[in-house]
Amino acid sequence: MGSKLLRGSFFMLIGNLIFRVGGYLYRFLMASLLGPAKYGILGITLPFQGILQTFSTGGLPPAIAKYVAEYEILDQKDMARQTIYTSLKMITILGLFFGALMVFVIAPWLGEVFLEKPETVLPLQIVGLIVPFSSIVGGIRGAFQGVYKMEYMLYSRAVEQVGMILFATAFVLLGLSVVGAMFGTVLGFIFSLIVSVYIFRNHMGKYIPKPNPDFKFSLNDELKLIKKLLFFSFPVVITSIAEMGIYSVCTIVMGRYLSTELVGYFAAADPIARLPLIISLSISTTILPAASEAFSSKNREKLTTYVTQSYKYSLVVVVPMCVAIALFSTQILEIVYFTNPDYVYGAAALAILSVGMTFYSIYVITSSIIQGIGNPKIPMYILIGGLIITLILNIILVPTHGIVGGSIATTIACLAMIIPGLYLVFRLTKTKAPVKEISKILIASIIMGAIILIILPKSTVGLVIGIIICPIIYLFSLIKLNFFTFDDINKIRPIAAKLGPLSNILNKIINYIAKNIKE
């Protein structure tokens, strides 16, 4: 099981990186080719695509993975196969229903009535065409996950990303504008579905063999299975919608009150602000099972170590990243969107959002710890509360303060989410907050930020110089604040040894840090 888990985690890591890098590439190309106003239309459309995809799958892909894995362990392969086919039938029906609902009802209402932007109707209708394909692909990926064939998920996701980027870019270059970008997404999912079905039919036979002729499964049995699947998937749907809402409410409310051009500026800044989340999301994936193991074994010392280190190792990277993004927001947008300098109008929103993502990074770690110690519903409730706060604040602030108001609303909501989360983490785990470590991170980040404000010019040259010297200043500040311990050094050395040509340089830095540790 250990090797299977490690192998699966490796493929999932690659898949997540491909998905994130592909997403950034897609957004960069579309922003550059479409311009702010048309990119704003695409930015308004994308949140509805994610929300509708979640509804159309009914939260079933994780349920498929869970129960297929359980039936495989119990050697009930007929039930594993039945779970897949029953789920796919449900997903197909849901996908067709929500797709048709989007095309004929929701999209016209959204574009004409709610958003008051008729130009968004056709792109939103195309979302309805995406949904049936994306939902079925999601179900098949759940089957791949259930038998630990994460590489099959990787192949499917890679085809989706590459197809979406290539077709969307080609269609936009041919003059089809936002409609072309959306049709590119449709084709990406169609090709992903073709590949997924091919893999399922030709390579899943040894994991999910043909049904036993003696296997009987009545309609009543299938209804019981459907009930079981839905009972598991319902909280997944609610949590997923709430999480997407934290990200998407801003854009949806802006689409109602602001011009598409202003929405385009925000949509260009938003993915850059989320970059630090890569760190916290990676750590949260690891801390969940680790916290679960320590909590269930009642190993208080190990649990305390895991909780402390998860916040420490996440924030030591996330906080300075967010500070740097906030202070160099204009220059970052100038470089990233060099083809269209107008996107710098999103700089203020980017600076504020980067602060919000610091708070959200803390929430991500907090959520995983709470789930790991056996309280999966608490993060759901916090997310729902955060979504309500985000919605209310956006409705209040966006009409008067534009995209800056939306960024402030999101940041306040993220801060509100971490307050109950942190309280519950330390109360439930009976551990102490790493106040000393976090204080040192904040002080070192403030020192680095002061250097940026006082010394470095606010220009592209200043950004390049900052990329070189700011990590040095930050690291030196942490060393002088006695942030690192010998335990940190022992954990870093094996990783540094595997980094090839960088190993010698990193070892010198590690040795310097070790010499300055005062314990």
Image: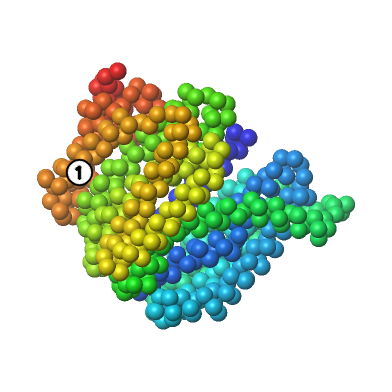
Image check: 366 left or right of 36?
A: right
Asked whether residue 180 is in view, the answer is: no
Q: Position of residue 11 (x, y in %)?
A: 53, 45
Q: Where's residue 256, x and y in %?
A: 37, 72
Nearer the observer, 185 or 158 = 185
User: The N terminus is located in which quarter?
Assistant: top right
Q: In the image, what residue occupies the spot 42% across and 38% down?
A: 423
Neighbour tally class for label 1: few under 14, some 14-19, many 20 plus, Cα within 10 Å: some
Q: Decide: is 179 above or below 233.
A: below
**Residue reaching furthest to the right:** 214
The quadrant in which residue 504 appears is: top left
Q: Quadrant of the C terminus?
A: top left
Q: Report the residue that reaches farthest toward the top.
A: 519
Residue at 81% of width from left, 60% of height from top?
A: 219
List x then y, in percent, for residue 339. Answer: 27, 67
In this rendering, is residue 308 above or below 281?
above
Q: Looking at numbered disc 1 in the image, what kind of residue is underneath it? A: Gly
Q: Nearer the viewer, residue 437 or 231?
A: 231
SS class, disc 1: helix
Q: How is the image coloured?
A: rainbow
Residue at x-position 33% and y-position 64%: 396
Residue 280 image point, x, y percent: 41, 43
Residue visible at 55% across and 25% down?
298
The residue labelled by disc 1 is: 449
Residue 364 seen in render: yes
How many numbered tags mark residues here? 1
